[in-house]
């Protein structure tokens, strides 16, 4: 049983299911599709079929037998329209892979949480494995108090996974890195017993194992198993992509979370687009409409609002020969998803002068760590600081 609240979480559940199914089918880790030598096909694998209705199969793609058994993916639907749209598209892909998907309007009104938890309690108690995408979610933490599963798996929710692992190792309260005030508020105090129970559940013991399935560089606490997510399912079922001659920019929601000043962000995007010849801007699903409108109107970039996580969009193509991002999840995931395609992933650090007065004191160090720990990426110089000068050196 898996619980997801974002498209990236659902993508990584599919990656985990593929990895677990492949491990079960072959009794060992088989080579990734696209590596040296052909990947063996399980004898029970069906003939290729469309990835989902209305989406044509690209030449060279094929289906892979998913995790053996019956995986139920529960979508705890958020309010954000863009996130909901991407989740519905990802749910189609999950069903196509043979998984059951249950859509829960978990935030549909005052009584929705009670109704959702009540409806899920029975199946959750019976589940042997529970997969979660966001251990910081209060919804997920509440559900963890119910489960009796002997195996808990945490799949990536982007760079937040790095902070989760660090806090778990130190035995700290789970707090998202971009929160400025880490002091518990009234709601935190009321919810503290549930959060503490979830933290205990995510600590392995003699009766329960904990696995982290991630593409991020993490140092797990003792007893926690880390399994590398190399995006084998994405590479096996999508692409390889057609490459354009230009550079594509990847947007972030750092303005929307109050970390980066909006004017400084627009200056940086404009400077990077000029310096690298970028013409397209792939928007993060949480970016505001007003900001994206300015990027299109004032900076002249074609704004693309993807219907699926960028890893899938990039793998399907067309995609630029260079993909340029600020510190974000994609500087870790795109090199794996696009391995062997000839695409270069580049990253530009966040200049500390771009941070707002409301940014968390941890923001600068965390963002620097996201970039510094990324593998197989190219570093590019800072875009201009507010004075209009380009900072010297490469961050």
Image (cartoon, rainbow, N blue to C red):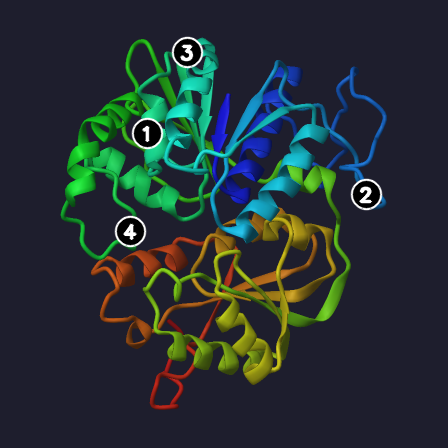
Residue at numbered disc 2? 54
**In the visual, does 196 lie left or right of 237?**
left
Residue at numbered disc 1? 141
Residue visible at 54% across and 51% down? 81
Residue visible at 33% across and 61% down? 368
Q: Quadrant of residue 246?
A: bottom right
| Circle nearer the N terminus (3, 2) | 2
Residue at numbered disc 4? 177
Q: Of helix, strand and loop, which one carries label 4?
A: loop
Q: Of helix, strand and loop, which one carries label 2?
A: loop
Task: Determine whether 192 is above or below 290 in the image.
Answer: above
Instruction: Give the x, y percent position of residue 337.
Output: 61, 47
**Numbered badge on residue 125:** 3
Q: Disc 4, disc 2: CB below 8 Å?
A: no
| Circle nearer the N terminus (1, 4) | 1
The residues bearing labels 4 and 2 have C-alpha atoms spaced at a distance of 39 Å
Instruction: Give the x, y percent position of residue 209.
Output: 37, 17
Q: Of helix, strand and loop, which one carries label 3?
A: helix
Instruction: Give the x, y percent position of residue 168.
Output: 26, 34
Task: Determine whether 357 is above or below 372 in the image.
Answer: below
The residues bearing labels 1 and 3 have C-alpha atoms spaced at a distance of 15 Å
Can you see residue 171? Answer: no
**In the visual, does 365 lie left or right of 73?**
left
Q: Disc 1, disc 3: CB below 8 Å?
A: no
| Circle nearer the N terminus (4, 2) | 2
Q: Residues within 10 Å of mark 2 (few under 14, many from 20)?
A: few
| Circle nearer the N terminus (4, 3) | 3
Q: Of helix, strand and loop, which one carries label 1?
A: helix
Instruction: Give the x, y percent position of residue 33.
Output: 71, 37
The residues bearing labels 3 and 2 have C-alpha atoms spaced at a distance of 37 Å
Tell which of 237 and 117 is nearer to you: 117
Tell which of 221 and 274 is nearer to you: 274
């Amino acid at each position: 049983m898996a619980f997801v609240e974002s498209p990236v979480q659902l993508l990584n559940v599919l990656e985990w299911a593929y990895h677990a199914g492949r491990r079960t089918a072959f009794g060992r880790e088989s080579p990734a599709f696209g590596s040296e030598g052909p990947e063996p096909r399980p004898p029970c694998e069906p003939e290729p079929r469309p990835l989902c209705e209305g989406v044509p199969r690209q030449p060279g793609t094929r289906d892979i037998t998913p995790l053996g058994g019956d995986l139920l993916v529960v979508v705890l639907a958020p309010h954000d329209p863009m996130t909901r749209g991407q989740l519905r598209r990802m749910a189609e892909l999950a069903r196509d892979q043979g998984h059951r998907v249950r859509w829960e309007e978990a935030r549909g009104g005052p009584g929705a949480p009670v109704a959702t938890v009540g409806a899920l309690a029975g199946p959750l108690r019976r589940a042997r494995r529970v997969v979660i995408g966001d251990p910081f979610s209060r919804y997920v933490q509440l559900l963890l108090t119910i489960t009796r599963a002997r195996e808990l798996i945490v799949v990536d929710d982007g760079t937040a996974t790095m902070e989760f692992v660090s806090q778990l190792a130190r035995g700290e309260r789970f707090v998202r890195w971009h929160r400025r005030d880490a002091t518990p508020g009234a709601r935190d105090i009321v919810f503290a017993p549930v959060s503490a129970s979830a933290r205990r559940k995510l600590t392995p013991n003699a009766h329960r194992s904990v696995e982290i399935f991630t593409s991020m560089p993490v140092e797990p606490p003792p007893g926690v198993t880390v399994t590398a997510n190399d995006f084998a399912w994405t590479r096996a079922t999508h692409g390889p992509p057609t490459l354009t001659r230009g550079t594509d920019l990847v947007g972030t929601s750092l303005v929307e979370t109050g970390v980066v000043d909006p004017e400084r962000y627009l200056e940086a995007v404009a400077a990077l687009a000029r310096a690298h010849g970028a013409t397209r801007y792939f928007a993060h699903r949480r970016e505001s409409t007003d900001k994206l409108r300015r990027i299109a109107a004032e900076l002249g970039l074609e704004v693309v609002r993807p219907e699926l996580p960028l890893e899938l969009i990039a793998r399907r193509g067309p995609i630029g020969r260079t993909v340029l991002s600020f510190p974000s999840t994609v500087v870790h995931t795109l090199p794996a998803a696009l391995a062997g395609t000839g695409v270069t992933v580049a990253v530009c650090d966040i200049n500390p002068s771009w941070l707002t007065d409301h940014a968390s004191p941890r923001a600068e160090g965390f963002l620097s760590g996201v970039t510094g720990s990324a593998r197989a990426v190219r570093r590019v110089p800072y875009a201009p600081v507010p004075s209009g000068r380009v900072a010297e050196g490469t961050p």
